[in-house]
């Protein structure tokens, strides 16, 4: 029951995300290339993306969704829009276990997780593409970027009484701050001691305090990257903030299609509670225009094929200010 409640709440949040909905509406529903094409919606959820494709004139849409409780919702959603049942096929199961009866023209998905490949969703899209997509087929979206930057102010540090800091998403921030320098491992349940904060406010533009710092970008290319390249991303980081106070690392996402970079979705502004991440750092004062260097490793978790391992190091003048290793939580429900 709790898993189903969490799943429904997550879908409600995504459906209320205007930025997300506008991107997929414009790239699917208003896209003339959909008409007459065979499509597949992987990880369909409520079926909203499949509905867009069918409304855009897709010849046929294969709808893949693992969670049994969502199948009836998909059917209901298509039925109330008077979609002919002959124009789609719903398949319950994991995409890795499914081979379609024909090659398809277009893969539609939103298997974008925390830090890009959280829950290894992008790996599943790539694996499915290799077996089911035509050689000249397209993926919507096919580019997912992780944007990393530093913040020089943070509301969690601006509270006058640290002992009065409230719980946020079941994280005691006061306990969290006291453990920031520990090398921790996070295995899926919200801990009160790890320095990983899921950003959930719908009313905050999280870039407002990062405009004085450059952005480092990690890019996933679902058409050209191999599965092994998607499974393992490593990047050397060099930040040169103009503000000399640093309090947190911010990770946001940008996703788009390579044939049109002007139309994109993102998670950095006040556009819904989805896939924005913060890692708090003890407030640091550095020389103005000084460099903060380090690295990040994004790899699959060998202990659970539905989560991702994150390792981050940051240094100032050879002094380590952030060293964390954690594992993203999994939202997949195998029941």
Image (cartoon, helix red, strand yellow):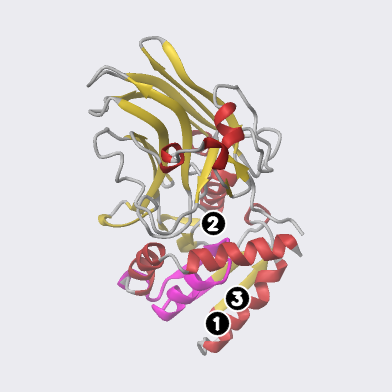
Relative image position of residue 327 (x, y in whole percent): 61, 36
Closest to the camera, between mark 3 and mark 2, is 3
Q: How many marks?
A: 3
The image quadrant where one finds the C terminus is bottom right
Position in image of residue 141 (x %, y %): 40, 56
Q: Which mark identifies residue 78? A: 1
Q: As drawn, is 1 to the left or to the right of 6?
A: right
Start and end of the magenta stretch?
A: 32-61
In the image: residue 74, left or right of residue 3: left
Along the line of sight, which residue is nearer the eye, 323 or 120? 323
CB within 8 Å, label 3 to label 2: no
Q: CA distance from mark 1 to mark 3?
A: 6 Å
Q: Residue at x 51, y 64 (%)?
A: 13
Task: Report helix, strand or loop for mark 1.
Answer: helix
Disc with the residue nearer the chain's start (2 vs 1): 1
Percent position (x, y) of residue 106? 44, 62
Give the residue pinned by disc 3: 74
Q: Which residue is mark 2?
A: 132
Helix, strand or loop for disc 2: helix
Q: Residue at x 56, y 52 (%)?
A: 128
Q: Are marks 2 and 1 in contact (CB under 8 Å)?
A: no
């Amino acid at each position: 029951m709790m898993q189903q409640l969490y799943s429904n709440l997550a879908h409600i949040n995504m459906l209320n995300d205007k930025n997300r909905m506008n991107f997929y509406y414009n790239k699917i529903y208003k896209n003339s290339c959909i008409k007459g094409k065979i499509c597949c919606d992987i990880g369909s959820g409520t079926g909203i993306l499949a509905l867009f494709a069918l409304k855009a004139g897709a010849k046929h849409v294969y709808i893949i969704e693992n969670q049994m409780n969502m199948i009836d919702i998909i059917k209901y959603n298509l039925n109330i829009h008077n979609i002919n049942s002959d124009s789609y096929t719903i398949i319950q199961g994991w995409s890795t276990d499914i081979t379609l009866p024909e090659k398809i023209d277009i893969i539609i998905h939103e298997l974008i997780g925390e830090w890009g490949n959280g829950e290894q969703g992008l790996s599943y899209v790539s694996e499915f593409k290799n077996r089911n997509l035509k050689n000249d087929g397209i993926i919507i979206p096919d580019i997912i970027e992780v944007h990393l930057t530093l913040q020089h102010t943070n509301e969690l540090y601006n509270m006058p009484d640290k002992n009065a800091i409230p719980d946020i998403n079941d994280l005691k921030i006061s306990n969290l701050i006291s453990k920031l320098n520990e090398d921790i491992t996070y295995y899926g349940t919200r801990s009160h001691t790890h320095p990983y904060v899921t950003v959930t406010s719908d009313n905050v533009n999280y870039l407002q305090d990062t405009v004085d710092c450059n952005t480092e970008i990690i890019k996933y290319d679902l058409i050209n990257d191999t599965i092994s390249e998607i499974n393992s991303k490593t990047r050397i980081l060099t930040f040169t903030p103009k503000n000399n106070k640093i309090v947190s690392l911010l990770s946001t996402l940008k996703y788009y299609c390579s044939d049109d970079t002007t139309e994109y979705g993102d998670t950095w502004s006040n556009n819904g509670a989805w896939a924005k991440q913060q890692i708090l750092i003890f407030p640091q004062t550095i020389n103005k225009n000084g460099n903060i260097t380090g690295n990040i490793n994004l790899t699959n978790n060998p202990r659970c094929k539905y989560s991702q391992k994150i390792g981050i190091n940051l240094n100032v003048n050879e002094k380590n200010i952030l060293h964390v290793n954690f594992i993203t939580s999994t939202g997949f429900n195998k029941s």
